[in-house]
Amino acid sequence: MIRVNGGDHEVTVEPRVTLADFLRDHLRLTGTHLGCEHGVCGACTVLLDGQAVRACLVFAVQADGQEVTTVEGMALSGLPTPLQEAFRRHQAYQCGFCTPGFLATGEALLRSGRPLTRQNLPQLLAGNICRCTGYSRIIRAILEVAGSR
Amino acid sequence: MKSAPFLYHRPTSLGEALDLLAEHGDEAKVLAGGQSLIPLMAMRLAQPAVLVDIGRIPELRRREGLTVGATVTNAELEGEGGGLPPVIAAALPHIGHFQIRNRGTLGGSLAHLDPAGEWPALALLLQVRLTLVSRRGGERQLAVEEFMRGPLQPAIEPDELLTAITFPADQPAGSPFGFAEVARRPGDFALAGAACILRGGQPRVVVFATGGLPQLVEAGRPIEATGDLHASAAYRRATSVDLVARVLAQAGAGATA
Amino acid sequence: MKVRGEATYVADIEFAGGLEAAFVRSPHASATFTLGDLRGRVFGAAQLNLLPISIGGPGLAATEWPPLAVDRVRYVGEAVAVVLAEDRYRAEDLAESVAVDYVPVETASIHEGCPDDVLFRGGHSSGEVDAELARAAHVYERTFRTARQTALPLENRGVLARRSGERLEVWTSTQVPHLARDLIARTLDLAPSQVRVITPDVGGGFGLKAHVFPEELVIAALAWRLGEPVRWLEDRRENLLASAHAHDEVIRLKVGVAADGQVRAVDAHLTADVGAYSIFPFSASLEPMTTGQTLFGPYAVPAYRFSALGIASHKCPAGAYRGVGMNAAAYATERMIDIIAGDLGLDVFELRRRNVVTEFPSRTMAGRELDSGDYRRLLTELAERAGYGRLREEQARARAEGRLVGIGVGLFNEHSGTGSTEYRARGVTAIPGNDSARVRVAADGSIDIFTSSADAGQGHARTYRLLAARELGVDPARVRVTEGDTDSCPPGSGTFVSRGPVGGFSSLVIALRQVAERDIAPGLEVTHSVDPHQVFPSGAHLAVVEVDRVGFVPRILRYIAVEDCGVVVDHDGVAGQVEGGICMGAGGVLLEQIAYGPDGQPLTTTLLDYLVPLASDAPAELELHHIESPSPRTVLGSKGVGEGGTIGAFAAVANAVADALAPLGVTLTDLPYAPSALYQAVVDGASGPLE
């Protein structure tokens, strides 16, 4: 049993199936992207029990009984989150492939309550690659939401 | 990049885990946080027939004073490392990225024993003691020097589990220390690193990420280094020497503060 | 909507019941091989029997690239067979089980009929180079090297093919849908109209996806022959090993300079390592020829000569990556200018001012027709915006404190929007060179736009809506944009060489204006095609870099860019392209390097080894400014902008690092400027003279 974006799922999978492949192939939640499958690029970052993790470095069976939030489940009652709104306003994406991972990372950082600044945020975002590469806009979008809290 | 198939076990007690390891031995690999093992499996460089997931064993997640269970995550230590030697808090943010630290464990880092890793260096610096348990041999304690046989080669028998790590009591909060490393980008494996504490008023210094296992810096003993894709041996040696000076200065500053 | 996870990349297309492919790839750099008995869904070259990709033309050795290797492999990662299974896990199991008998070989040549391994040989000469060099007050000779790199879009390559009756539908993550359609049709001996290529959302291209690859042909062939849907999703390891590399070039320069700093003559020898095959459609000429045409581009040089070689090696084929050839040109040129300035005791801005082209239009000694520009103003603007005098004072103070702080300037011009004339002139026949747009007015008055371009993440649709709103006075929300569908879009070249604002905008705006002239009548449809001529954007960049004395890790503290891409249509879009390009170029100077061992074994097979810039590598402060020199060759006066950021950064960041280390007696020539290499340069610089 796994809870994903508020819904419970009981699915039998091979133990070797990663959480990322489980979300994409078994639940058809294709917003979680595969960029490297060895834990470096951050495109598959999701929230597992509220913590940002690489979904390619977790076997789905390890998440048994836990709660996963993907980009599709971030919006509350269909409305985009403040962070999603800020990404849109700042055009903090080009090709969009890294965006779900950055949103998960950003959401986790915002929820952590740690102060986010122009100085520390680039280091904290070093676990996600944007190849296009719109880091400055991503940073502006996250800081704007952090500043409004 | 998909893992080869394997049999998966998720014991919920230490006894059950030890039974599984006794049964499968060489065939089995222990899965803790998986942040080093799963990439190797994805590349099929590791193809264990059996995976024993120790992520749900309460005994391994305990912390009793200075003894910390093997599956306590780096993020948990970052959040509430109070009472542990203060050099640890300085080193933790350098271990991968925070997403990796959310899953990666203390025991996993030491059992993997990557020479560029921060935990092996801290373990040698602090002279931690490691608790290993098996059905066959029961419980034994190893000094860190005995535990680190070589890069990626911990002294863990195939049927044995690293259960806990005990930190020394002589580094309470406020103890002076130094920690510094050079990496090309935040979260990358270090190109060179150094860490320092004071023990009995004397500095104890370790350098790491120089190619082989972490090394204790001692007068008259040159730092050994090897080169690879990211840095030459000469660079690593020279940078280590600079970093030793830096961490000594930090520890000195800490002592007077 | 991309922020809600609703974009659809190839991997996201519904594929239940289809067959997933995995390739069996060579672990040897050079070997002959035999496949054992193939059972089940395992296919080698003999089973598929596909036409090879043929490359030839002026200066090029005629070579063939078989979609699956035939008897012989030429680099690690080359596909020798393909397998199909119900999912990728099982496909990898099956691929691992295929027995291949390799016999390593070290033969004299990589391709039969090309004994010297030279896949391309070209050059150009204008003016009296030898006489000018003989007369010059100073002659400087330096050899520069750029690193082997790869574009590494975050989305790997991916292809999904499905046969329906006598037609084949192919979804592929490409920048060149029509080129892909035509090559697939030719390979399968079908009429182009039988093949429909569709590009869904593309997770970045940066030139990598401007090629048509063997894998696309193999997947299309399997779907066609088996009649079942087939998909291949490249993984990152394959992407690093076997997609396309770029930028690996040696640039040998001999420059004659008059006593007043005027550059009188340039003699250049360019050698690019193009890997095992001549890539489609650009061929082995791409990197060295582009560099030859771009060297000293912004400067008025009376005599210029270059020779360009593309040499085969047992490595992954080299092709396009943002700024291809031009990065190397700007890097070598601008490093050389700084070396000359340092030797003559001239300020780096002053030496550039004395040498820049000031007349437009004009023809460069490399034979390029510069359309418009104002290079002096770029430099003046840059120096003012950056507060250059103050920066030098701050640098002097930092140096007095023992800090290694450097200031680097990069001036460049680049070509964008290459058309058929220019492609034919350099022997490239596979690219049509034109760009097309179709505008249709729906019954309800809403507008449909179809173009021959293909968005790889640049945000074409937003810009096209702006143009439609401007030309037709319609609400942008009532404009639909379709790209990357060879059934509904008019044929053209695709998305590369920053051609969008050149032929792309021109064809669209002309079509829109024709629609406006006919009163936007419902049911109206206009298609227009433009065969553009190159136009020349330019820019001047300045970087401030600090190198830590412990560990020699360089960090970019400040970055100021002044860009001239002609008339700007979408300011946000342009800023995104330039900022992104600068960050990528900084990575090109400081981080990115594909490495091979002497045995041809790749050493960079993960993203822990191939390092790309992270948020922490982007300049701490980045400022963009624009000047506008409208191009007389485009309808709106616009020019390409996708690559300028990268090109400028290759020069400015490199010069800044070099300037930071200059007090230590160091001259840097070889990319990347990695910590270990900088350390070694400092050690060598301290112990003796260079060169």
Image (cartoon, rainbow, N blue to C red):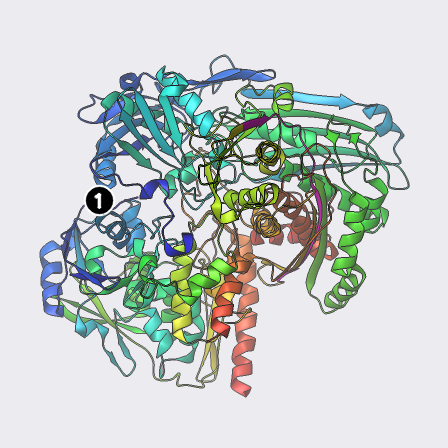
**Observer-nearest residue: B85 or C243?**
C243
Q: Is residue C240 magenta?
A: no
Q: Residue B12 in the image: state x and y as whole percent.
A: 13, 67
From what the image shows, is residue C180 above or below residue C638?
above
Point out the stretch of residues depicted in magenta. C527-548
- Callout 1: residue from which chain? B
Q: Is residue C530 magenta?
A: yes
Residue C214 in the figure: left or right of residue C448? left
* Extreme residue in the top direction: C113
Q: Which residue is drawn at 79% across and 37% down?
A: C299
Please, what is the dominant secondary structure of the magenta stretch? strand
Q: Is residue C105 visible in the rendered structure shown here?
A: no
Residue at image mark 1 = B4
Counting labels gives 1
**Observer-nearest residue: C404 or B238?**
C404
Q: Residue B97 in the image: state x and y as whole percent.
A: 41, 62
**Observer-nearest residue: C472 or C501?**
C472
Q: Residue A3 in the image: state x and y as whole percent.
A: 21, 63
From what the image shows, is residue B217 above or below residue C520?
below
- Label 1 sits on a secondary structure element that is loop
From what the image shows, is residue C159 above or below residue A147?
above
**Which image quadrant: the C terminus of chain B?**
bottom right
Q: How crowded is mark 1: few (under 14 residues within 10 Å), some or many (20 or more)?
A: many
Residue C225 in the figure: left or right of residue C620? left
**Which image quadrant: the N terminus of chain B?**
top left
Residue C545 in the figure: left or right of residue B238? right
**Observer-nearest residue: C453 or B162?**
C453
Q: Residue at x 70, y 32 (%)?
A: C633
Q: Residue C14 in the image: state x and y as whole percent.
A: 27, 41
Quadrant in the rendering for residue C412: top right
Amino acid on which the number 1 mark rests in the picture: Ala
Q: Is residue C283 visible in the rendered structure shown here?
A: yes
